[in-house]
Amino acid sequence: MHPRHLIAAALLALCSSAHSLSLAEPVSAAQNTPPALSLDDALGIAAASNPVLRSAVASTNASSGAFMQAGARPNPNLSLLQEGLGGPDRTSTALVEQTIELGGKRQARLDVASYGRQAALASLDGQAAQLRAAVITAFYDMLAAQRQMQMAQESADIALRSADMADKRARAGKISPVESTKARVAAADAQIALASARTQAALAMEKLANVTGSPEVRNRTVTGDLDALPEIEPLPALQSRLDESPASRVAQAEVLRSNALVSVQKARRIPDITVSAGMKRVWTSGIPDNQAVVGVSIPLPIFDTNKGAILEASHNAEKASADLDSEKARLQLELAQSWSSYENAAQEGRRLKDEVLPAAKQTLDAMLRGFELGKFSFLDVLDAQRTLFQAQSQYVKALSAAHQAHAEIGRLVGTPLVANGSGATRLN
């Protein structure tokens, strides 16, 4: 039989088997299959189920209690004093004592708690942005793994068909048995690559389930456009947004909080006064008499002037200011790196799509035509197929890297966990 007829017959058999398998699928099984998971679905599940985010929400809610407690005033004291338990001469005194804070201590505590709550809210936004980046990365890793598995399946099918045809031609004496053996080895390698791709897809699904915090994700496939790369702003525009990023806001709130702590320590140098008022009942020779009692208590700051605490708070404020500058520099560098990574990955993907993949496909088609005419061996065809598969894999990896870099940019600038969709540029 002519080689062209062998190839046509193999392709026809493959299409027929695939068609029969699709028709044999039970309708009930398709109906029971859970719906595919989109990126918005994954983000929504993570917002409701991720334990790290729930912990951050609880921590933020706790800061409201700290603010409430900071505004509480000192409780009054009730004291009772009895002099003499019996007899005609005895005294009973009842006093209510109230400490009055001076020097703005209460307001200073409220400022500290207020800035602490600002830091907690900014930290919550940071956790949400970090979770968003992790979900997007895991989602597109899963999409890439599915694409890799599909390409590995196609490559394994072609390698297997080529090996079968090589066996037939070897038995017919048209090619060397060594060439047939090499074709079988190549088919086995393709099956190993397919098994590895399936393992990677299972691992990617496990990572997605872990980051969303929902085990139900494991039973669903993901759907999305891996080739559509999100648009990003120019680097200067992104850098101007860093001052409002969660990490910057946390550092800024810590500076304000540390300065407020200095005010707290300075206010503690001013002593509080305690006023008391009450009634004293005196029995003299059995005759009772009532007397009003008032008093004032003022500590004398002779030995403890709180200088050490003030010095410590001042240096902590200097540290917080330095940490803010360091955080800004770190964010600038990481943003520049992520922006460059996105641009490099996007350019690599475009070049692979526009130049490498078409050339690899043309080479494979030419090898197939040449094989039909007896000009090339099966190994040449398999080598061209391997080159195309590697180029496709590299293209998928470039797309995945671009999506990961874009997610990292969103984390740095503080993109909310559930945001409105943005424009995208599709590479093919």
Image (cartoon, rainbow, N blue to C red):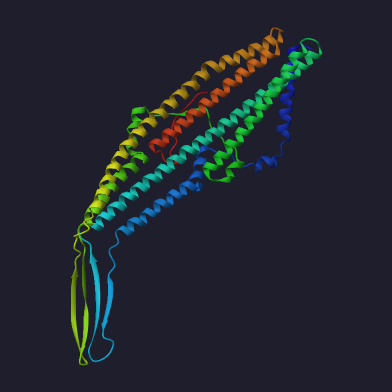
Which of the pair 422/321 is nearer the observer? Answer: 321
Which of the pair 73/301 is nearer the observer? Answer: 301
Q: Is residue 179 above or below residue 224?
A: above
Where residue 61 appears, as percent x and y from the top left, is 40, 53
Q: Is residue 114 above or below residue 21?
A: below
At 41% from the left and 38% from the top, the residue drawn is 415
Residue 248 is left or right of residue 158, and the answer is left
At 18% from the left and 60% from the top, the residue drawn is 302
Residue 386 lies in quadrant: top right
Where residue 203 appears, as percent x and y from the top left, is 59, 36
Where residue 87 appears, as percent x and y from the top left, is 26, 91
Which of the pair 422/350 is nearer the observer? Answer: 350
Residue 62 lies in quadrant: bottom left
**In this view of the protein, can residue 11 be seen by the observer?**
no
Where residue 85 appears, as percent x and y from the top left, is 28, 87
At 28% from the left and 89% from the top, the residue drawn is 86
Quadrant location, the N terminus: top right
**In this view of the protein, can residue 329 be seen by the observer?**
yes
Question: Which residue is situated farthest in the front direction here?
Answer: 303
Number of callouts: 0
Which of the pair 15/237 is nearer the observer? Answer: 237
At 71% from the left and 28% from the top, the residue drawn is 18
